Every structure is written in structure tokens, then in C-alpha cells.
Amino acid sequence: MDIKRIINLIILDASGSMESIYNQALTGTNETIQTIRIGQKDHPELQQYLTFASFNSGNDYLKVKYSVTPIDEVKEITKEDYVACGCTALYDAMGEMISELKRKMTPEDRVLVTVITDGYENSSIHWSGPQIKSLVEELRHEGWTFTYIGANQDVEAVAGSMGIRNTLAFEETEEGTAKMYKRDSLSRKRFMDKLSHLKMMGCKCLVEEEDYFEEKK
């Protein structure tokens, strides 16, 4: 089936520990949105959509700002949209958002999932690590691309426990966070360029990208 839509799913940590890099996280998120907008202009044959959610813990742990929204209808994320507090219900956020998006997918969609966190899972009650891994591995075989960006942890080990192969570690500093978002934006652009090329070649593209963060010469 030919590719028509790229769904960019961004799941951003909004726990209290993110306050130390709050401004950089907010700015970086909006830079990512701009990268997606540019991708839409560069490759009009691929329709870009955004699903964006931030998470912490408690009864209202998940805040969904956009859900499969055309990028032309997306506005910048504001301080009212992104509030850092609480703990880290990472599994619950991933399980809820990925499952919801799975229900909305069509065979003509490709999904790029980006998870950004500065700490370990510590407060989920609905989803477990093995459940997340099972879900991720199922969808990877359907062509979804998963990326995990983390600080203050063994990123490869944590991501691997959830079945995610594309990883990026960053330093939880202003400079380190800004550098991370720049790296992700460059990787996202390459991802869009590659999908556009594969679409032109008539490829069905049902294989996950496993070199998302690799810098090409």
C-alpha cells in the first residue's frame, strides 16, 4: 500500500525533574513542530500529522494537546500546554497513546514515535514494561519507527527493555537539551527524505527504520 500520511507521535515527559530544562524542552518541541511543517512543504506528497502528549503522574497524568492533527492546523506548544510536576508514569503514557493511535491507523500511514524523558518509569499503574515491549514489537513489524531519547539513565538498556532500538542519550543541561533537539530534528528530516524517496520508488515500506539517529556523511 502506498504511503500517504506520516503520523508524528511525540510523548514528552512533564514530571517535576524536567523543570531544570523546561525552557529548552518547550523551545525544542516547537522547533520539532517547525521541522515537521518544513517536511510538509518539502514533500507535499506526504501528509504530515501530529499527535502530541505530555505526561507526569496521578489521575490526570496525561495531557493530549493534538491527536492526528494535520500539521497546518498545529500551533506552538505554550506554557499552559506543558506543565512540569509530579512523577513519571512512562509506561501508562506510552501504552495509552500508542494504543489510541493504533486504533486510528490505516494501511497507508507510517508512524514515527518519539519518547523523551529525563528519568526512569516510577508510577505507572495500568501498563507494565513487558506489555509495552509486546506492543512495540508488534507495531515495529508493521513498519512503525520507535525512538527513545533519555537522560540520567542507561538509554540503550531502558529502551531495549521496551523493544525500542533507536536511542539517543542527552545531558540534562540547557546546552545538552538544545543539542539533543537539534539532533532529533536532523534525523526527522532524513527520515522524511527517505520516505519520500521510497514512495517515489513505489516501495511499501513495511520495515522499521533502525538507523534513525545515525549521522550520514
Image: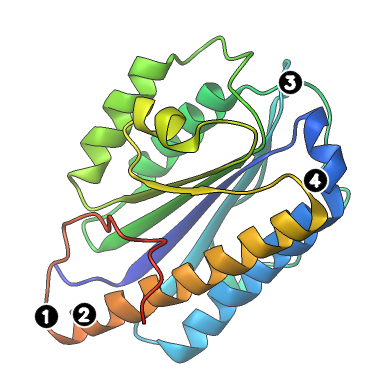
Q: Nearer the viewer, mark 3 or mark 4?
A: 3
- 1 and 4 marks in contact (CB < 8 Å): no
- 3 and 4 marks in contact (CB < 8 Å): no
Query: Residue at 51% of width from left, 31% of height from top?
Result: 154
Would you name the residue on which mark 4 appears? Answer: 82
| Location of residue 92 by image quarter | top right
- Marks 3/2: CA distance? 41 Å
Q: Is residue 154 above or below residue 187?
A: above
- Marks 2/1: CA distance? 5 Å
Q: Crowdedness of circle 4 by 10 Å Cα count: few (<14), some, many (20+)?
A: many
Q: Give the amino acid type for the residue marked by disc 1 in the picture.
A: Gly
Query: Residue at 56% of width from left, 30% of height from top?
Result: 93
Would you name the residue on which mark 2 appears? Answer: 199
Q: Is residue 177 above or below residue 216?
A: above
Query: Residue at 31% of width from left, 29% of height from top?
Result: 135
Number of the label disc, if any, that sits on residue 202: 1
- 2 and 1 marks in contact (CB < 8 Å): yes
Q: Quadrant of the N terminus?
A: bottom left
- Marks 1/4: CA distance? 40 Å
Along the viewing direction, whichever of 5 and 196 lies nearer the viewer = 196
